[in-house]
Amino acid sequence: MFQAASERLEMTGESYTLVGTGSVIMHSAIYWARLCEQVRKFAPLLTPRRSPHPAVLGMALEGLRRQQLPQYNQAAAKLLATYRDVMKQGTTNGPPAISG
C-alpha cells in the first residue's frame, strides 16, 4: 500500500523523511528494520525515522496549538516532560477505558 501511494505521488525518486509511528513500529526493531529494507527497494532516497513519542502526543500538542493560548510554549514543554508518567498511570489505575 505504501509503495503504491508513494509511486502515485511520484515520491519514489525524491528525498523525504519516512516517519514511522504506531506501537508495532515503535516497539519492534525487527519489524522496523524489515520495513525499511523493503522501502529501500523502491524508494532508496527516503530517510526512515521512528518517532520516539506516541502519535497521540502529537495530537495533544496540535490541540494545544489550535487553542492559540499565550502559554502554548509552557504547556507544550510541560506535556513533553510529563506525558510518560501520565500514560503509565493510565495503564495501572482501574479497568481499560474501552473493553470487549
Image (cartoon, rainbow, N blue to C red):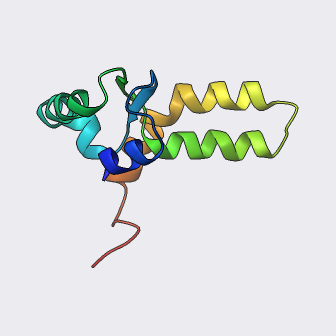
Going by the picture, which residue comes out furthest to the right? Answer: 70
Q: Position of residue 66 (x, y in %)?
A: 78, 45
Give the quarter of the figure containing the C terminus. bottom left
User: Residue shown at 11%/32% (left/top)?
Assistant: 30
Q: Nearer the viewer, residue 7 or 50?
A: 7
Task: Tell me how many marks there are.
Answer: 0
Residue 67 vs 28, above or below: the answer is below
Q: Nearer the viewer, residue 91 or 20?
A: 20
Q: Classify residue 71 as left or right of residue 90.
A: right
Q: Position of residue 85 (x, y in %)?
A: 43, 35
Q: Nearer the viewer, residue 99 or 21?
A: 21
Q: Classify residue 65 as left or right of residue 56.
A: right
Q: Nearer the viewer, residue 10 or 47?
A: 10
Quarter assignment of residue 19: top left
Q: Position of residue 27 (x, y in %)?
A: 22, 36
Quarter assignment of residue 72: top right
User: Residue shown at 38%/72% (left/top)?
Assistant: 98
User: Residue shown at 37%/55% (left/top)?
Assistant: 93
Q: Classify residue 28 as left or right of residue 22.
A: left
Q: Position of residue 69 (x, y in %)?
A: 85, 38
Q: Classify residue 69 as left or right of residue 82.
A: right
